[in-house]
């Protein structure tokens, strides 16, 4: 505690005021925000666009696995507290099978 009081008194003695020194984290000049603005428009936005193209534009649709009625899979010991109690919260009728099979037929191209 005494060390904290000494450090605070040194800061107050150096500044001559009650406020502590403020550090400028974004740069050293008043116009440094312009560098961040340029970095955002010329680096961040193209990376975001390329990420979206990679995720949604070039993605191949995976095949869903064949339904096999195993005793140890898709066990419902207690109903889900939403809907009809048989569908999970993020249920996809094409990829998520219910205990008795898929809800939709697979489309053949």
Image (tube, rainbow, N blue to C red):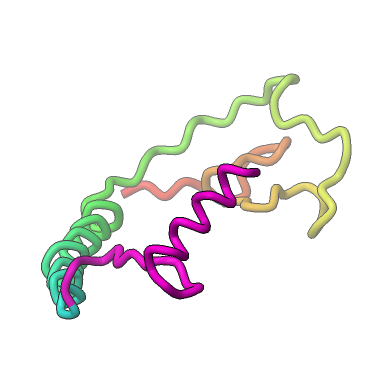
Question: Is residue 81 magenta-colored?
Answer: no
Where 37 sits versus 89, above or below?
A: below
For the point 42% across and 50% down, the residue is: 107
Position of residue 10 in the picture relative to residue 68 (left or right): left
For the point 44% across and 60% down, the residue is: 11
- On the image, the x and y values in percent for residue 10 come to 45, 56
Q: Which residues are magenta?
A: 1-29
* In front of the other: 15 or 23: 15
Where 51 sits versus 68, above or below?
A: below
Question: Is residue 18 magenta-colored?
Answer: yes
For the point 15% across and 79% down, the residue is: 31
* In front of the other: 53 or 97: 53
Q: Quadrant of residue 14?
A: bottom left
For the point 65% across and 43% down, the residue is: 1
Position of residue 68 in the picture relative to residue 77 (left or right): left
Q: In this view, which residue lies farthest toward the right?
A: 78
Where 66 sits versus 21, above or below?
A: above
- On the image, the x and y values in percent for residue 17 come to 45, 75
Position of residue 15 in the picture relative to residue 8 (left or right): left
């Amino acid at each position: 505690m005494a060390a904290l009081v000494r450090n605070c008194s040194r800061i107050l003695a150096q500044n001559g005021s009650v406020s502590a020194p403020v550090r400028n984290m974004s740069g050293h000049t008043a116009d440094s925000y312009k560098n961040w603005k340029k970095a955002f428009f010329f680096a961040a936005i193209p990376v975001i666009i390329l990420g979206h193209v990679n995720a949604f534009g070039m993605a191949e649709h995976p095949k869903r696995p064949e339904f096999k009625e195993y005793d140890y899979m898709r066990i419902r010991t207690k109903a889900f507290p939403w809907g009809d109690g048989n569908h999970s919260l993020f249920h996809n009728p094409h990829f998520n099978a219910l205990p008795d099979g898929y809800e939709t037929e697979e489309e053949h191209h």
